[in-house]
Image (cartoon, rainbow, N blue to C red):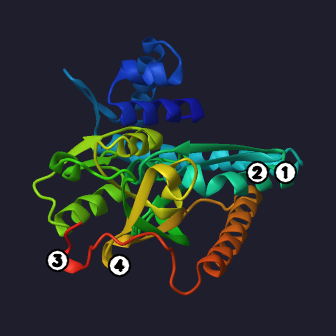
Amino acid sequence: MDLAGLRVVKAVADTGSVSRAAEALNCVQSNVTARIKRLEEDLGVDLFLRLSRGMEPTPAGRVLSGYADRVLRLVAQARDAVAEAAGRGGRLAVGSMESTAAVRLPPILARFHRDHPDVELTITPGPTETLLGDVLGGRLDGAFVGGEVAHPDLTARRIFDEELVLAEPAAGLTTDSARRTLLAFGRACAYRGRAEMAMREAGRVPFRVMEFGALDAILGCVGAGMGVTVIPRSVVERDPWRELLVARPLPQALGRMPTQFVRRTDAIETASLRAFLDAFSGDIASVAHSKKAATGATGSPTSRAGLNGSSAAC
């Protein structure tokens, strides 16, 4: 049993196929098959069931796959820790909801890169459920996700709260079809559930959902009058959307969404990750203070949607 064998076991367990595992590992299928056979002979157990539709881990295979995941993540963390100790920076893979990556992260990333130029930082955008899976699977060191997180293998650190608003075209919605059309990401998005609840709360039922894969595509289509969306106010208030969209507040129960940074509970907090979180937290506190001072106690001056409890009709 070695690292190469563990990588093969994990790849086959993750993909459910020798061919897909070989593609992921950039090797030929015969190497994957030989590695699995050698491990099974060494351990004296079958690790996978050979099915017509692919490979399925046996109970023993699931156990070994779990250990392989932990060992490979620990090896990667050890490499990064040694690189940091040697003064060669390190690597940091962070996931983020697209709205957070578009609005919140750029100034913090610029400062972090200036202060830590040797850290190899990658940002992967995606919906909350996908990001949680990538963190659990060790593909990301951490991620900014929306909503409360309760998972025994994850540690969540609350970073800030977003105010979700109903975004409509500034020119107004001219058809009932557009009023009942929700433009949104797929169901893995944390905002999608809130958006559907907001449509029901506003009496816009029945409604249809048009799914998009990019934030700017959603906002552009809302601006063109195709429908509405639910998005953080911080997104609507940036250029060019502030001129094209109007933000209408939601009821408090729907409008407040925490953004949290999650990472595996058993993961080592490297110096790079600690510096990143410290820089991010400091900048968010400064932004929140500045925004409060600018808006005053009454908050944002944008118009209200009329979404007050079950009587809402926006």
Q: CA distance from mark 1 to mark 3?
A: 49 Å
List the residue tagged with mark 4. 252
Circle 4 Cα neighbour tier, 10 Å, few/some/many (<14 / 14–19 / ≥20): few
Residue, disc 2: 110
From the viewer's perspective, tell me whether residue 278 is left or right of residue 254: right
Would you say the residues marked 4 and 2 are in contact, meaning their CB atoms lie under 8 Å apart? no
Using the rendered view, name the quadrant where residue 36 is placed.
top left
Label number found at residue 310:
3
At x 58% / y 50%, what residue is drawn? 239
Residue appearing at x 38%, y 48% in the figure: 63
- Image side of residue 291 versus residue 153, left or right: right
State the quadrant of the N terminus.
top right
Tell whether label 1 touches label 2 (CB within 8 Å): yes
Circle 3: residue type? Ser
Q: Could you give the CA–CA distance between mark 4 and mark 3, rounded to whole angstroms?
A: 13 Å
User: How far apart in space, not on screen, are marks 2 and 1 (Cα)?
Assistant: 6 Å
Q: CA distance from mark 3 to mark 2?
A: 44 Å
Real-space CA distance between mark 4 and mark 1, rounded to the nearest whole angstrom: 38 Å
Amino acid type for the residue under numbered disc 4? Gln
- What is the three-letter code of the residue carrying label 1? Arg
Q: Position of residue 278 (x, y in %)?
A: 72, 68
Residue occupying image coordinates x 20% and y 67%: 202
**Amino acid type, mark 2:** Ala
The local secondary structure at tag 1 comes to: helix
Of all residues, the one furthest to the bottom in this rendering is 297
To which residue does mark 1 refer? 114
Q: Does 305 sit above or below residue 24? A: below
- Is 33 in front, or is 185? 185
| Of pointers 4 and 2, the one earlier in the residue sequence | 2
Q: Choose the circle earlier in sequence order: 4 or 3.
A: 4
Within-10-Å neighbours for mark 1: few <14, some 14–19, many 20+: few
